[in-house]
């Protein structure tokens, strides 16, 4: 009767059921183990980069300021979704409250848009470092870095606020089953029983702006970087310049390719079955890989982590 009443009154459901891989019970245990290990690695790797960036004087530069914010963002990304997924996979009741669902997709979209702007700021930093090395300290000063970071976080919050305001107004007519691992705006729009044309259009415009504009700036920056690097006479110099950018390009690819596939397709062709696994990829796999990509390909970060481990070892030995 409650569901019937909701269909007439428009009251939101008290909770949603997150299907995850309930239709494939044999997959739940292996996926639980993978998620748990990935979450632990993501926490360990990102916390290590944040500590190294803050405590090591050799990493007090704009590049590592942006990197520490990216690591903090990845920590928040995984913590927003993974604990709830682990609880649901270990329980027969795979539910999330309406309020919890709203907070989850609000924070998730805030962080996603923030990362788009932050990756563009990191590309700008690499452009200035390679194309304008003599003016780097003047152009990429501390105040500008703080302004770019603030712009990233505030822009992401603004986008999320608009999405939440529109999504919480959608009626669900008693529908409670989300074919996803966690709450996302596209899945909520798909679940609604009302005309979602305004939501679809707003989501498409905002996501296109927050995905395509930063991506265009990143590609433009790396176009100028590639031209500058090819002019370097020394092969060692070219290798070093490309090495400083390769980590960032790998992170950009891991983040943008799933996001473009997920959000820049027509709503009519959105597949929840495909979408939930793509969401799983960029909500846990990408944040887990990011710190290892930067660590394995960056001598400064590896050196800072060794010094951090040595300091921790000395403190534990006292």
Image: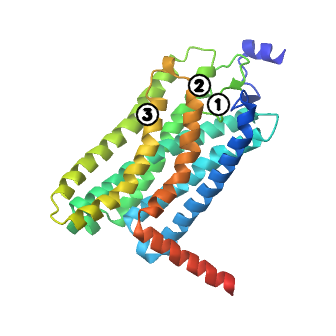
Structural crowding at the residue carrying mark 3, measured as other residues with C-alpha within 10 Å and reported as few (<14), some (14–19) or many (≥20): some
Rendered location of residue 118, percent (x, y): 42, 51
Q: What residue sits right under mark 3 in the picture?
A: 260
- The answer to whether one can see residue 60 in this image is no
Quadrant in which residue 1 is drawn: top right
Structural crowding at the residue carrying mark 2, measured as other residues with C-alpha within 10 Å and reported as few (<14), some (14–19) or many (≥20): some
Q: What residue sits right under mark 1 in the picture?
A: 180
Rendered location of residue 75, percent (x, y): 58, 54
Which residue does the image show at 62% across and 51% down from the upper left? 38
Q: 303 or 267: nearer the eye?
A: 303
Q: Residue furthest right?
A: 1
Structural crowding at the residue carrying mark 1, measured as other residues with C-alpha within 10 Å and reported as few (<14), some (14–19) or many (≥20): many
Alpha carbon distance from label 1 to label 3? 18 Å
Circles 2 and 1 in contact, beta carbons < 8 Å: yes
Which residue does the image show at 34% across and 39% down from the upper left? 213
In the rendered image, the quadrant that contains the C terminus is bottom right
Quadrant in which residue 234 is drawn: bottom left
Is residue 247 shown above or below 158? Answer: below
What SS does tag 1 mark?
Answer: loop
User: Upstream in the sequence, badge 1 or badge 3?
Assistant: 1
Q: 315 or 238: nearer the eye?
A: 238
Which residue does the image show at 40% across and 56% down from the upper left? 247
What SS does tag 3 mark?
Answer: helix
Q: Is residue 179 left or right of residue 309?
A: right
What SS does tag 2 mark?
Answer: helix
User: Upstream in the sequence, badge 2 or badge 1?
Assistant: 1
Q: What residue sits right under mark 2 in the picture?
A: 272
Rendered location of residue 235, percent (x, y): 21, 64
Rendered location of residue 200, percent (x, y): 49, 22
């Amino acid at each position: 009767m409650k569901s019937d009443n909701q269909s007439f009154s428009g009251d939101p459901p008290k909770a949603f059921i997150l299907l995850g891989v309930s239709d494939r019970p044999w997959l739940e245990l292996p996926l639980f183990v993978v998620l748990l290990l990935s979450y632990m690695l993501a926490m360990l790797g990102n916390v290590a980069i944040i500590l190294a960036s803050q405590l090591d004087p050799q990493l007090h530069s704009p590049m590592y300021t942006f990197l520490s914010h990216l690591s903090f963002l990845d920590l928040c990304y995984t913590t927003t979704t993974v604990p709830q997924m682990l609880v649901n996979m270990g329980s027969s009741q795979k539910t999330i409250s309406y309020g919890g669902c709203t907070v989850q997709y609000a924070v998730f979209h805030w962080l996603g848009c923030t990362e788009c702007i932050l990756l563009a700021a990191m590309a700008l930093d690499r452009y200035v470092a390679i194309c304008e090395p003599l003016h780097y300290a003047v152009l990429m000063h501390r105040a500008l870095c703080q302004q770019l970071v603030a712009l990233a976080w505030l822009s992401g919050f603004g986008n999320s606020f608009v999405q939440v305001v529109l999504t919480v107004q959608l009626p669900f007519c008693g529908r409670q089953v989300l074919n996803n691992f966690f709450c996302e705006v596209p899945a909520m729009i798909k679940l609604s029983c009302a005309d979602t044309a305004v939501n679809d259009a707003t989501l498409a415009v905002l996501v296109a702006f927050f995905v395509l504009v930063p991506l265009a700036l990143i590609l433009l920056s790396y176009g100028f970087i590639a031209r500058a690097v090819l002019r370097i006479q020394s092969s060692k110099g070219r290798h070093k310049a490309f090495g400083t950018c390769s980590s960032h390009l790998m992170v950009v690819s891991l983040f943008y390719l799933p996001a473009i596939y997920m959000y820049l397709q027509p709503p009519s062709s959105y597949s929840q079955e495909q979408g939930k696994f793509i969401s799983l990829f960029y909500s846990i796999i990408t944040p887990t890989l990011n710190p290892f990509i930067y660590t394995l390909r960056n001598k400064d970060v590896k050196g800072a982590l060794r010094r951090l481990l040595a300091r921790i070892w000395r403190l534990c030995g006292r």
